C-alpha cells in the first residue's frame, strides 16, 4: 500500500500545487501538460486524523485495519516528512502511540475486586498488532538516529520510549491478560526499543550511563514514572491489575545512584503496596521498600533518625565510666566500610559529602574510629575527582573537622597526613583537569589542614616546610606553604 492509498483511506487526499483539470475534454484540445507532483498533507494532520480514528473505532475489525495502517505509515513514509523536527509533530506522534496502546488497554476494575479472567480474553489478541506497529515506529527512529543530523529522531525516540516501555512490560507478565504469543510480541517490542536507543538492557534503559557525554545513553526512568504516576496514587492503583507489576518490575531494575533522585516518586507507591491487607500486595510492597532502602543513600536522613533514638555523642559531657559505643558508632563504622570499598565516582562523592556531618555529630568520640577515618581520608585525597573535585574537597573538610575534635590524638599521625597533603598540593598545581575555582579551593583547604596539623605538632612543622626545595614545586605551592609558616602560633 503506497502513501496516497493510505491517505485516501484516512480521507486525507494528497494536495497538489494546481487544481486538477476537467475530466472531459474535446479531441481537438492540445495535449495536457504534465501535472505537478502531488504533495502529502502536513504530517500533523495525518497523525491527528489517525489518532481520532483509533480512539473512535467501534469494533475490533475497524481497529485492526487502523493499526495496520499506522504500521504501514511508520514503515514506508518518508522519514523527513514523518519525523519532521517540530514540537507539534512530536506531540502528535506521542498521541498516536498512546492511542495505539489504548486499543489494547486492560479493563478497569473496582477496588479490591479484580475483573474475572473472561474480562481479559480479548486483550492478548489486541496487544499483538499494537506491539508490531509500535516496533515498526521504533525501528524507523533507530535507523534515523544513525544518520547525520539524527537529533530530531533522538528527541522523538525519548518522547515515545516511556509509554512503549510500560506497554511492553505490561504484556511481558505471565498474567491473565497475556498469552505466549502476546508475550513474544511484547518481547519483540522491548527489543526494538532497546536497539533503537542503543540501550544494553532494560536496566540501562532506565538508568542510562553514569557519566553523561557524547555517545552516552540517557536514562528514561523519569519518563516511565511520568506515564505510571497517574495510576499510582491511593485512589487509582487498584483500578489496574497490571500497574503494580509494572511499577515493581521497573523499580527492582534500578540501583544506586540512579534511584536516589526519584525517591519522592518511588517510595509512596511502595508504601501503599506494603500497607495493603492482601498478602500478595503487602509482600510486593515490602520487597520494593527493601530495595529502596538498599539502593538509596539516606545518610542525612539517618542522622535525623539517630537523634530520635539517642543523644548525639558530641553533646554528652565527660562521664565515668568512659562513654560506651552507641548506634552513632555503628552507622559511622558502616559508612567507613562502604567508603573504603566504593569505586563508583558518584557514590564516592555522596559518601565523602556525608562524612563531615557524621564527624561533627560524633565529636571527640570519633577517636574510637580514628585509624579507619585516617585510612579512608588518605584514600579519597589520593584519587582525583575532576572537574569540581567534590570528593577531595569533602575529604579535606572531614580532615579539618577530625583534627579539630581529636587534636590530642593527632601528633602521631602528623607525618603521614602531611605527606599526603603535600602530594595533593603538587598534583593540583600541575593538573589541568580541575576547574580554576576547584583548584583554588583545594589549595586553600589543604593550607588550612597543614596549619591545623602544625598546631597539633606545636609548630614543629614550620621548620620542615621552610626546607622545601623551591626548584621542585610551583610558585603557587610555595605561596600556600609560606602562609602557613608566617602564621602566628596559637
Image (cartoon, grey):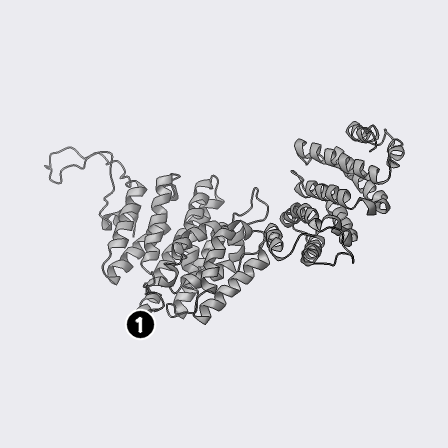
**Is 318 in front, or is 112?**
318
Q: Is residue 58 left or right of residue 105?
A: left
Q: Is residue 469 left or right of residue 84?
A: right
> Which percent across, then down, holds residue 43?
32, 42
> Which percent across, then down, holds residue 230?
38, 54
Q: Badge 1 local density, few (<14 within 10 Å), some, or many (20+)?
A: few
> Which percent across, then down, holds residue 484?
81, 31
SS at mark 1?
helix
Picture residue at 55% right of the left edge, 58% below the top? 292
**Is 92 in front, or is 410?**
410
From what the image shows, is residue 61 above or below residue 317? below
Picture residue at 72% right of the left edge, 46% below the top? 380
**Is 39 in front, or is 89?**
89
Regarding residue 139, the answer to whether it shows in the image is no
Regarding residue 292, the answer to whether it shows in the image is yes
* Location of mark 1 (residue): 118
Amino acid at each position: 500500500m503506497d502513501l496516497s492509498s493510505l491517505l485516501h483511506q484516512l480521507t486525507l487526499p494528497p494536495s497538489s500545487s494546481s487544481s486538477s483539470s476537467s475530466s472531459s475534454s474535446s479531441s481537438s484540445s492540445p495535449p495536457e501538460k504534465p501535472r505537478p507532483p502531488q504533495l502529502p498533507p502536513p504530517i500533523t494532520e495525518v497523525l491527528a486524523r489517525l489518532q481520532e480514528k483509533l480512539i473512535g473505532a467501534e469494533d475490533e475489525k475497524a481497529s485492526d485495519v487502523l493499526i495496520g495502517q499506522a504500521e504501514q505509515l511508520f514503515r514506508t513514509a518518508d522519514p523527513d516528512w514523518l519525523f519532521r523536527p517540530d514540537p507539534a509533530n512530536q506531540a502528535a506522534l506521542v498521541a498516536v502511540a498512546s492511542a495505539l496502546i489504548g486499543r489494547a488497554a486492560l479493563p478497569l476494575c473496582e477496588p479490591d475486586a479484580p475483573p474475572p479472567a473472561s474480562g481479559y480474553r480479548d486483550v492478548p489478541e489486541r496487544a499483538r498488532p499494537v506491539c508490531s506497529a509500535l516496533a515498526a515506529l521504533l525501528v524507523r527512529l533507530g535507523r534515523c538516529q544513525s544518520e547525520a543530523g539524527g537529533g530530531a529522531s533522538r528527541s522523538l525516540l525519548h518522547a515515545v520510549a516511556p509509554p512503549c516501555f510500560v506497554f511492553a512490560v505490561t504484556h511481558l507478565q505471565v498474567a491473565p491478560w497475556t498469552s505466549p504469543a502476546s508475550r513474544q510480541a511484547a518481547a519483540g517490542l522491548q527489543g526494538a526499543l532497546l536497539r533503537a536507543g542503543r540501550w544494553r538492557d532494560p536496566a540501562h534503559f532506565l538508568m542510562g550511563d553514569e557519566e553523561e557525554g557524547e555517545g552516552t545513553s540517557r536514562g528514561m526512568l523519569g519518563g516511565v514514572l511520568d506515564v505510571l504516576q497517574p495510576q499510582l496514587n491511593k485512589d487509582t492503583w487498584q483500578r489496574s491489575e497490571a500497574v503494580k507489576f509494572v511499577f515493581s518490575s521497573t523499580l527492582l531494575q534500578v540501583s544506586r545512584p540512579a534511584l536516589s533522585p526519584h525517591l519522592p516518586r518511588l517510595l509512596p507507591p511502595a508504601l501503599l503496596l506494603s500497607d495493603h491487607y492482601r498478602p500478595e500486595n503487602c509482600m510486593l510492597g515490602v520487597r520494593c521498600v527493601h530495595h529502596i532502602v538498599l539502593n538509596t543513600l539516606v545518610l542525612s536522613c539517618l542522622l535525623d533518625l539517630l537523634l530520635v533514638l539517642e543523644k548525639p555523642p558530641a553533646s554528652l559531657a565527660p562521664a565515668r565510666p568512659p562513654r560506651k559505643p552507641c548506634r552513632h558508632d555503628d552507622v559511622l563504622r558502616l559508612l567507613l566500610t562502604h567508603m573504603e570499598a566504593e569505586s563508583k565516582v558518584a557514590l564516592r562523592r555522596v559518601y565523602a559529602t556525608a562524612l563531615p556531618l557524621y564527624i561533627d555529630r560524633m565529636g571527640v568520640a570519633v577517636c574510637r574510629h580514628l585509624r579507619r577515618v585516617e585510612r579512608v581520608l588518605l584514600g579519597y585525597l589520593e584519587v582525583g575527582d575532576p572537574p569540581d573535585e567534590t570528593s577531595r574537597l569533602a575529604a579535606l573538610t572531614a580532615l579539618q573537622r577530625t583534627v579539630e575534635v581529636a587534636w590530642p590524638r593527632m601528633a602521631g599521625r602528623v607525618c603521614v597526613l602531611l605527606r599526603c597533603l603535600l602530594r595533593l598540593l603538587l598534583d593540583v598545581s600541575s593538573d589541568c583537569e580541575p576547574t580554576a575555582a576547584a583548584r583554588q579551593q583545594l589549595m586553600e583547604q589543604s593550607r588550612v589542614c597543614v596549619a591545623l596539623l602544625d598546631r597539633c605538632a606545636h609548630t614543629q612543622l614550620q621548620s620542615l616546610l621552610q626546607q622545601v626545595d623551591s626548584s621542585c614545586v610551583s610558585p603557587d605551592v610555595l605561596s600556600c606553604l609560606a602562609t602557613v609558616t608566617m602564621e602566628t602560633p596559637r
